[in-house]
Image (cartoon, rainbow, N blue to C red):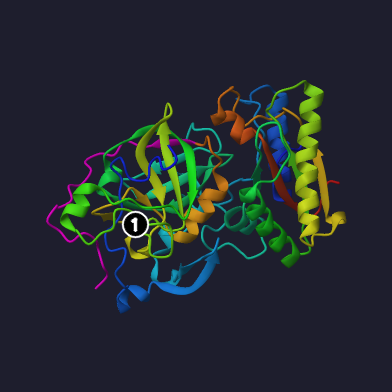
Amino acid sequence: MRFELGNRTAAFAAVMLAALTAGCATSGRPSATLQSTSTGDATNAPVQGGINVQGGSEEDFIVNVGRRTFFPEGAATLDDTAQVTLDKQAQWLVEYPHWKVKLQGFADDQGTEAEQKALSQKRADAVRDYLASKGVPRDRMKAKGYGRDRLVGDCADIECTAQNRRVITNPQEEPDF
Amino acid sequence: MATAGAGAAGCLSQADAATKPSKAALAFFQGTAEDNGFVFRLTNWKKIDPKWRRQLVKYKSREPQGTVVVDTSNHFLYLIFENQTALRYGVGVGRDGFRWYGRARIDRKALWPRWVPPPEMRERQPELPEYMDGGADNPLGPRALYLFRSGKDLGYRLHGTLEPWSIGSNVSSGCVRMFSEDIIDLYQRCPVGTRVLVLKHLGAPVINEAAPVDTQPQ
């Protein structure tokens, strides 16, 4: 049940899991990485240090690199934009070698459940292979496809599908793989 | 439609494109970077109020993840993340940025966009070219994201700027302008099809038509 979870949020994951099993989750949406640890809870309260993010922290990765790689319909190809994002990810991962990454692939495309699962795995594998080609050791990466699970938005429109056809790169210090 | 949004509709940028930055202006830059064959000036963050810098914040919203929310009144742009958080960017808002609000979608994205000065701007400043190719002196900066609704170009866009000091303020022209570093970052994070919500702005300030076309730092 751990999707898109950073390692700092293990406790939060437990809470979310409890919430899901209790049936009070609102959307079946992937739970998340970001949990505010700041005291402020109002809109605009800084989360995880605001601009004072520590270089090499998970927040640094989220704010200054970005976890998401997007894909065209029905494909696991990496376009120019995806490669720019992955170049930044690779650079960061080479610079901060204590991090491992879980690469979570998703699909919202044509085809059966099995086909979409296979496509999401191909997407995650494509990201892994690209990062490896840029110097990230393969033993620091785990690629897994989740098919059409955990949609960001559920509609036939590109507004939903573009967000769903993705791979999330999750840095983990103590990986669950 | 190859150049859709290149300037047909109302959202335009500053007209000082070709002028050399003053010494005061140059203090807002530090170093340069190369991007897709062009060189642009990097922002000197020491000169920028920290509140306008990209940062992770709490954000309470019903918008799904990946949505861009533009709050023109407060000069912030948010990219919605999970768990009521968002990545917040500071923006500068031009007169045309206040002319419209509501829902839209990013249907087109451009690297080093061309700029077509509107006819009325060229009347005031005949020295302006009919259009300007993308590049280091182009006022739209390194990226532009074009907003559409039902396939129609709203003439509203998110773009870069040559004037980092204008972030966080209202300026006389332009749509929604961002630091070069930030519009490049946002471009990476928003696939074509990204939902955009421009919040209703209350009492958008009237900008004096007679005022200088842009705000140069003194």
Q: Rate crowding at label 1 as few (under 14), some (14 to 19) or many (20 or more) other CA atoms within 10 Å.
A: many
Three-letter residue code for mark 1: Gly
Relative side of A102 to A157, left or right: right
Relative side of B148 to B218, left or right: right
Which residues are the magenta region? Answer: B195-218
Relative side of B27 to A145, left or right: left
Residue B172 higher or lower than B148, as above or below: below
Q: Nearer the viewer, residue B70 or A134?
A: A134
What residue lies at 76% left-to-right and 35% top-to-bottom?
Answer: A120
Residue A55 higher or lower than A154, as above or below: below
- Residue lying farthest bottom? B23
Q: Nearer the viewer, residue B37 or B98?
A: B37
Residue A68 higher or lower than A95, as above or below: above
- Read off the residue under disc 1: B168
Q: Nearer the viewer, residue B56 or B141?
A: B141
What residue lies at 80% left-to-right and 26% top-to-bottom?
Answer: A115
Q: Is residue B143 magenta?
A: no
Q: How many marks?
A: 1
Label 1 marks a residue whose chain is B
Q: What secondary structure characterizes most of the magenta part?
A: loop
Picture quarter containing residue B46?
bottom left
Picture quarter containing residue B4?
top left
Q: Nearer the viewer, residue B34 or B170?
A: B34
Q: Is residue B69 visible?
A: yes
What residue lies at 57% left-to-right and 55% top-to-bottom?
Answer: A63
Residue B70 x/y as whole percent: 40, 42
Picture quarter containing residue A11?
top right
Which quadrant, please, contains the N terminus of chain A? top right
Residue B194 x/y as whole percent: 51, 37
Secondary structure of residue under mark 1:
loop
Q: Is residue B214 magenta?
A: yes
Residue A38 x/y as whole percent: 55, 52
